[in-house]
Image (cartoon, rainbow, N blue to C red):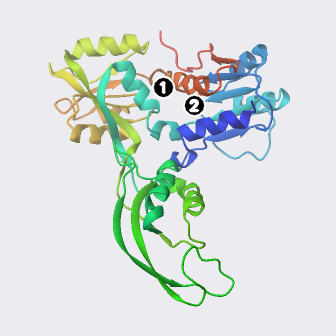
Amino acid sequence: MRIKEIVSALERFAPLPLQDGFDNAGLQIGLTEAEATGALLCLDVTEAVLDEAIALGYNLVISHHPLIFKGYKSITGRDYVEHCIMKAIKNDIVIYSAHTNLDNAPGGVNFKIAEKIGLSNVRVLEAKENTLVKLVTFVPTAQAEDVRKALFAAGCGCIGNYDACSYNIEGEGTFCAQEGSHPFCGSIGELHTEKEVRIETVLPAYKKSEVIKALLSAHPYEEPAFDLYPLQNSWTQAGAGVIGELETPETELEFLKRIKKTFEVGCLKHNKLTGREIQTVALCGGAGAFLMPLAIRNGADVFITGEIKYHDYFGHDTDILLAEIGHYESEQYTKEIFYTIIRELFPNLALQQCKVNTNPIKYL
């Protein structure tokens, strides 16, 4: 298969519009028309990672953290990023990254962390804002069901744990077809009244083009009427961090020791132990301390993330248990998400999780 097919599969799971404004997820280096000889999955792109791909004969490296964040006016090998850029181009290696789009995606990085911890009833902690659109269209009664099905297939109608959601009102539409038109019903030059259904449904804004294409294809009218309204509703299926529950409560020390073992943490930092039971767990992979207030407001017993600043620890001993496990450690299982997505769709592709530990932080 071509590399672009693999990229398309990743972007269906974690659409690029879900990335945060500072990010640079997506294609980093290379041409995606090439046939894929194999894919190496990693957290970070380093020269050692590229050497592993070269040794394996793979021409695709998929990372969580983007290699390129800033613009470059020259590539001269001044730092490790430029060395990697030069090595990838020289060896015809494509580099693709799924970063905060994968963090924010349903079933993404934070859901994988929750799975490793053993949480149930997992839901997004900070839902995406201003990302939903309402579609309203008007369809002849006999064709309304076909149009609804086409809209749902294109990504409309998902609200929380429900799909195929729509609201329908019966009414009458009027129109007068002009010369040069080809009306589905009625006659040219005559006012026509048609029994219609007003269909309302919601969709993520980034799916707008796909949905409109599906609507125009399924709608019987030559020029169907439709409206799109931006919504201020939160999109609870996508966003930063997650929160969930343990089936059985654990003591603080039991829980922290299990987390340390599960994520192979060299140095787990935490605030004062107060003897609370741990059952409701909030978390965010990477640098997620910005979600700490939300974790407290949602009644979490513990908040786990990769990085917490020194001053963020103050004043929370009675509010919540804080656990800082390291950026790399918190996101290391992202490679498993890549593996599952690609293996299910491309079972014959040579695929390997990177054996290089790219964590730049070492512990004595």
Query: x, y (%) of residue 248?
Result: 20, 17
Residue at point 37% right, 13% down?
A: 260
Identify residue type, mark 2. His
Q: Quadrant of residue 241?
A: top left
Name the one closer to the observer, 78 or 256.
256
User: Would residue 86 appear left or right of 291 to someone viewing this image?
Assistant: right
Query: x, y (%) of residue 26?
Result: 64, 41
**Residue that carries the numbered disc 1 in the rendered image:** 331
Q: How many marks?
A: 2
- SS class, disc 1: helix
Q: Is any part of residue 327 visible from this angle?
A: yes
- SS class, disc 2: loop
User: Would residue 90 appear left or right of 157 to someone viewing this image?
Assistant: right
Name the one closer to the observer, 171 or 256.
171
Q: Within 10 Å of the Cα at label 1, are there few (<14), some (14-19), or many (20+) other Cα atoms? A: many
User: Would residue 136 appear left or right of 125 to someone viewing this image?
Assistant: right
In the current view of this chain or complex, which residue is farthest to the right?
Answer: 90
Query: x, y (%) of residue 170?
Result: 35, 70
Identify residue type, mark 1. Glu
Of callouts 1 and 2, which one flags the residue occurring earlier in the amino acid sequence?
2
Residue at point 28% right, 42% down?
A: 294
Q: Within 10 Å of the Cα at label 2, are there few (<14), some (14-19), or many (20+) other Cα atoms? A: many
Residue at point 19% right, 33% down?
A: 319
Name the one closer to the observer, 311 or 344.
344
Query: x, y (%) of residue 168?
Result: 35, 63
Q: Quadrant of residue 114?
A: top left
**Residue that carries the numbered disc 2 in the rendered image:** 64
Q: Is any part of residue 43 visible from this angle?
A: no
Would you place residue 164 above or below residue 276 in this image?
A: below
Name the one closer to the observer, 252 or 266.
252
- Separation of marks 1 and 2 at Cα, in angstroms: 9 Å
- Label pair 1/2, CB-CB below 8 angstroms: yes
